[in-house]
Image: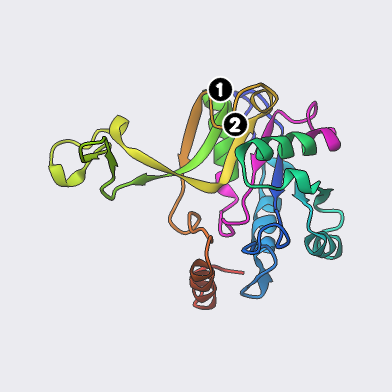
């Protein structure tokens, strides 16, 4: 991740987890192969060349106990207030800022990588790619993304209208008309942008394209069962 021709940008990673008391569907401690879901996320982030510090922010004591037992000295634990654990972008920003101030990260790190428990298979190479993209393009934040090649439509009040490129209409595939889907697990935010009055997902954005395996996300019981089956069949190495 280090390149002498680009400006240095020290990076810390924060993994916010609400836990089952607030979110009964939380998968952090669910078994996934020989590990738990949280292990996949943390072990990938700890392998990264660019992430210097990893913090887990949660109000859940079961998760805190697990981290204390298995990651003491490797991961910092932030016992988050329940008031900051609801589902909203505002509370996400407040949580990230709260962690930064609590651990005095604000003045030490120029960028924050927000990890996601729903993306346990994210490869550490994408953390490095996101950082180098931010350093090269001088943007406010970098997302992981997939080009959407299915047909998408919006309703304009009179009926459905095609959004972006539609490959079944023929003609050239124009990049500026592509639709992109954000992939959780790689959201790199410049510290100055996070400390501004702007929303997190405003300002200048760049993206890196995520491969299909790393982009696999777990949001439902069905997704979790699919992930378990893929691990059991050797699609992901433990």
Q: Is residue 140 left or right of residue 20?
A: left
Q: Position of residue 2 (x, y in %)?
A: 64, 34
Q: Residue at x 56, y 54 (%)?
A: 122
Q: Is residue 5 above or below residue 104?
A: above
Q: Position of residue 142 (x, y in %)?
A: 54, 34
Q: Position of residue 223 (x, y in %)?
A: 50, 67
Q: Is residue 62 left or right of residue 144?
A: right
The colour mode here is rainbow
Quadrant where the image shows the C terminus: bottom right
Q: Residue at x 50, y 76 (%)?
A: 229
Label 2's element?
loop
Residue at which label 1 appears: 138
Work out which residue is located at the far front of the displayed protein and give it. 157
Q: Position of residue 187 (x, y in %)?
A: 58, 40
Q: Is residue 129 left or right of residue 75?
A: left
Assess whether residue 77 is covered by the magenta stretch. Answer: no
Q: Residue at x 22, y 37 (%)?
A: 173
Instruction: Locate residue 163: give its quadrant.
Output: top left
Residue at which label 2 appears: 200
**Quick one: label 1 or label 2, which is nearer the N terminus?**
1
Task: Report the predominant secondary structure element of the magenta stretch.
Answer: loop
Q: Is residue 122 above or below residue 132?
A: below
Q: Is residue 186 visible?
A: yes
| Mark 1 or 2, closer to the camera | 2
- In front of the other: 186 or 45: 186
Instruction: Locate residue 73: give its quadrant.
Output: bottom right
Q: Is residue 136 above or below residue 119?
A: above
- In front of the other: 1 or 63: 63
Q: Which mark is residue 66?
A: none
3D distance between C-alphas at marks 1 and 2? 16 Å
Give the magenta range.
100-126
Q: Residue at x 82, y 50 (%)?
A: 77
């Amino acid at each position: 991740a280090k390149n002498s021709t680009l400006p240095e940008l020290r990076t810390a990673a924060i993994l916010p987890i609400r836990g089952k008391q607030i979110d009964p569907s939380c998968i952090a401690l669910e078994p996934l192969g020989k590990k738990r879901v949280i292990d996949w996320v943390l072990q990938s982030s700890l392998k990264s060349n660019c992430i210097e510090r990893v913090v887990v922010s949660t109000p859940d004591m079961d998760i805190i106990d697990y981290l204390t037992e298995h990651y003491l000295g490797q991961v910092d634990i932030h016992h988050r207030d329940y008031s900051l654990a609801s589902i909203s972008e505002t509370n996400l920003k407040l949580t990230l800022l709260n962690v930064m101030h609590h651990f005095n990260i604000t003045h030490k790190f120029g960028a924050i990588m927000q990890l996601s428990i729903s993306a346990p298979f994210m490869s550490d190479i994408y953390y490095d790619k996101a950082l180098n993209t931010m350093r090269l393009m001088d943007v406010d934040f970098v997302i992981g993304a997939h080009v959407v090649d299915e047909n998408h439509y919006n309703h304009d009040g009179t009926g459905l209208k095609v959004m972006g490129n539609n490959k079944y209409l023929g003609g050239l595939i124009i990049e500026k008309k592509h639709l992109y889907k954000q992939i959780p697990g790689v959201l790199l935010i410049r510290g100055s942008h996070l400390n501004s009055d702007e929303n997190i997902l405003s300002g200048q954005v760049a993206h890196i394209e995520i491969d299909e395996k790393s982009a696999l996300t777990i949001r439902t019981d069905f997704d979790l069962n699919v992930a378990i089956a893929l691990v059991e069949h050797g699609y992901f190495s433990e």
